Amino acid sequence: MPRTKFLQLAEVFERLEKTASSLAMIDILADFFPKISPEEAKISAYLLRGELAPAYENLEIGLADKMVARAIAKSENIKVEKVKLLYNKTGDLGLVVVSLREMSRRDKNLKLKSSVVRRPNIDFLTVKEVFEKLIEIARIGGEGSQDKKINLLADLFSKTSNLEAKYIIRTILGTLRLGVGEMTFLQGLAKAFGAGKKDKEILEYAFNVLSDLGEIACIVSESGIKKISEIKPKVGAPIRVMLSNRIQELEEIKDHISGLVSVEEKYDGERIQAHIKKTGETSLFSRRQDNITHQYPDIIDGLKKSFAGKEAIVEGEVVAYNEAKGKLLPFQVLMSRRRKHNIEEYVKKIPVRYFLFDLLYLDGKNYLKQPLKERRAVLERSFSDKGGKKINPINFGRYAITDDLSEIKSYFNDSIKRGAEGVMIKDYSGIYQAGSRGWLWIKFKKEYQKELADNFDLAVIGGLYGAGRRAKTYGSLLVAAYNPITNKYYSFTKVGTGFTDENLSRLMKMFEKYKLKEKHKSVETGMKPDVWFEPKIVMEISGAEITVSPIHTVAKDKIKTGGLALRFPKFLRWREDKSAENATTVEEIYNIYKMGVKK
């Protein structure tokens, strides 16, 4: 198979950028991937998402706007001030390159058939060559690293066309907004290499297990769907977490789960997936797959001492803990452990407990499709929560196995008294549905006893300028729910209350890098804010009730008179542990609305 030119991939980027239709995107991907090699499929999968590796590896090039502007000036042999002037007008360094080259072409009175402008006498680079150069730039560190990166980037620009350079720049700066969601990408692969819905489900399962679109694309391109179906967990590659549904009354449990359930305390902490190697590196991943190993050296030490096997993947909740009083502490206390420096000081200052609740993989065996009953038994055989004279931060979460509703209610009330925020109710015979939200796990929190069930984690899509003491910041933020099927964000409410002065003072800087000149193509709303944002930051909010709105768009395809909206919303906290694609879904909100209507 001939080597694919990067220009061909850049042309795919351009086609994807010009469409908002998920079906059209799927067709574009399905047409492209069978024409390239497995290695190029892996590379292209990363680049289509604006990445150089799986997201959990956090491999970034490390160049800001000013440095990229210098590289452009160097490659075009002009003063950097000219680049900055154009940047101030367009707000897009990718477009700056295009403008500079088109101006150069006009100055030389060149009449070319193609709009793709490149240096003469230079062959187009391949996908692999461009990718390897970006990896090289990303891995440069130490003294003088920025100048080295700028020089290499300038050299790369000098060998690429305007179209290629535009998308390379957007990849570097994290502004590549093609709108290709994870499910859209997998549907494209399924159409390219599979035979229908069943193959898409196999690809989705494999991605939920490995969390690596590049690896999935490479395997299916080289060996087909059958090989993908044999995928099992790999220590070091975070598994996408299983999600729960919610109910408003405990009596609803029997509508979804028959037989025995495991009732567990729901902690106000941070869900962490631990990848343990007894003789190697142990890693901790947040629910959005950030590597947070450095934040919890006490947990790493505790896991290695407690674990009896060779390697494992387990899940649990880390909670700040008052050892003297034996009391669980709020999430905000735990978040002060999120720091790069003085970790050891905060280990002593804020002790934690890691409550293990699930085992996903152990010594070569995949436990994802085993019932919870077996996973729990193997977990407790494989770990010890005894620390001898020293307190062991590794614990097993409290739970009760029952099918008696009165026992569940009693357990819930007792958990609230102990400082938990509610309970998780799990099908005792259920499997672990990685990356999925189903009725095998149900959450019930103390807020559910109020008029409106639960809080919502929503993606911020816009900002409205404030007045008075908020005149120099955003007075309110427009937020949206996510629909993984359409890969779109639907507005749900505008939030202006609950912010502290400190919150308000940070807003402008927090959202600066996500500002857009126009609405993101994945956003659906009838409201026009002062500023549009790329859906990246997630906030948790509460509200009084869900109503029908002519402006907001949640479930607008199911509500004849408009979409759903949240009344009297209040900001609670930022959810750094959640990506926008992990926001509360449109389906969840619609189900809550239906439950309220039935009452």
Image (spheres, rainbow, N blue to C red):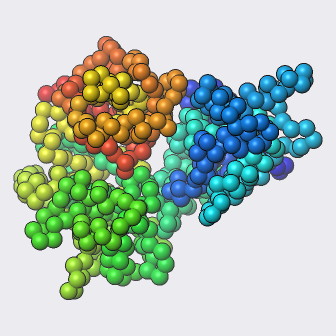
In the orientation shown, which residue stands out farthest toward the right? Answer: 121
Residue 176 visible in the picture: yes
Residue drawn at (39%, 27%) of the image = 463
Q: Is 529 drawn above or below residue 591 in the view shown?
A: above
Look at the picture and state if 62 lies above or below 346: above
Which of the 4 image quarters holds residue 355? bottom left
Q: Nearer the viewer, residue 399 or 157?
A: 157
View extreme (bottom): residue: 389
The percent coordinates of residue 560 (x first, y second) are 33, 14
Q: Is residue 556 visible?
A: no
- Give the quarter of the image for residue 376: bottom left
- Residue 40: x %, y % from top left: 72, 51
* As drawn, 562 above or below 416: above
Is residue 305 toward the left or the right of residue 189 in the image? left
Where is residue 316, by image quadrant?
bottom left
At which x and y percent is residue 205?
49, 52
Split into 4 quadrants, where in the image is the C terminus?
top left
Against 28, is 527 above or below?
Answer: above
Q: Residue at point 89% right, 43% down?
A: 122
Residue at 22 percent of width and 83 percent of height: 390
Q: Nearer the viewer, residue 376 or 289?
A: 289
Q: Residue at x 25, y 72 (%)?
A: 348
Residue 506: horizontal and vertical position, in percent?
A: 35, 39
